[in-house]
Amino acid sequence: MMTGAGGNDEAVEVSAGAQTGALLDVALVHYPVLNRQGEVIGSAVTNLDIHDIARTARTYGVRRYYLVTPYEDQQRLVAELLAHWLTGRGGKLNPARKTALELVRVVPDLAALYEQVSAARAQRPLILATSARDQAARMDYGQARQQLAVGKPALILLGTAWGLAPAALAGVDAFLPPISGGGDYNHLPVRAAAAITLDRLCR
Amino acid sequence: MMTGAGGNDEAVEVSAGAQTGALLDVALVHYPVLNRQGEVIGSAVTNLDIHDIARTARTYGVRRYYLVTPYEDQQRLVAELLAHWLTGRGGKLNPARKTALELVRVVPDLAALYEQVSAARAQRPLILATSARDQAARMDYGQARQQLAVGKPALILLGTAWGLAPAALAGVDAFLPPISGGGDYNHLPVRAAAAITLDRLCR
């Protein structure tokens, strides 16, 4: 909404929000997810999900924003987009966008995701999934904040299309409650769900 | 993220969130806003801002989501898009999207916006602007929630491009604090700012 100095790793204010965000990684899963009919599919990476969630992740001081896709053409597309912003014209014209997109990494599958985050954290993070459906192994936002407050890193899995497929849920430690606005409409964009989830965790 | 029954006006759960949301209107302002150089411009309406913020507004039970643009070609474009979803093929294929887009209205300017919302509320709402910049007349989220808790309706102004121009700030009662994630990065997408603002107000 507004230009400014732009964030950088050296100049982050020390505050509860920033400390919490630094314990978080976010992953947007494109496979395996469900389609409208409940079948397992792979979804296409969208330019907008990359930009919006990267900007939100940077706002909250998140360590990395991972895109999970096994498709090589999609991985190439992301690499081209990132090159435009990180080393090409895009970043010169809009340095704040570059700062956000520096957080993005591509991994082929959840196994590689868990391996990379666990290596970076020197421990397996708490793996939390968001879901518009109600799930059994729930952890509410207060409980998740308590884990973060004692220094436990967490990895937030966000699903594209009609949500994470059952196979993607196998490694998950707990589910954050569906985001409710008080009514029964549960069709929030994943970009909005990412923003609300990070704001609630870093509150 | 997930299909479901879809929200409708008759079947909204009674809860603090839904009651609060019903007191809110949201407006996305495309003129007058600032460009990167701080000059007053009109921005283009984007498909994505319409869909994302409509879905978020519906989630929180917001009464109306207004697009403020004086440009007739932009108004026609919105009308065509809405027709596709409200009376055309789109709504049949994706009824949940239709339910969200039913909230959208187009107004040519802020004067018309204030007039319409005041008429619908039978009183002038509290007009709150969001800003990535720090502003003088602040109202924090707790104070805004107190106003809503006693039944005062509020209209939330969101700016596109590099934020609301000074002329757009004249009728504003107060500014919600800039959304901070604990660091100094203030380049949140307006779609994410809308989601976080509604979640904080309806908490």
Image (cartoon, coloured by chain):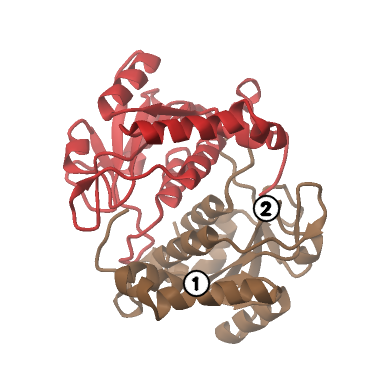
Chain colours: A red, B brown
Q: Is residue B125 visible?
A: no
SS category of the residue bearing label 1: helix
Label of residue A186 in the image: none
Say which quarter of the image contains residue A157: top left
Who's the residue at 68% across and 77% down the image? B72
* Neighbours of disc 1 within 10 Å: few (<14), some (14-19), many (20+): some
Q: Residue furthest front?
A: A73
- Give amino acid for label 1: Leu
Residue at coordinates 64% horizontally, 77% vertically from top-left?
Answer: B107
The reply to whether residue A46 is in sight is yes
B128 lies left or right of A109:
right
Look at 48% across and 40% down and name the residue there: A50
Circle 2 residue: B131
Q: Position of residue A88 (x, y in %)?
A: 64, 29
Amino acid type shown at disc 2: Ser
Q: Are tags 1 and 2 found on a single chain?
A: yes
Calculate the distance from the C-alpha at mark 1 to the C-alpha at mark 2.
28 Å
Residue A51 position, x and y percent, is 53, 41
Q: Which residue is mark 1?
A: B81
Tell which of B144 and A43 is nearer to you. A43
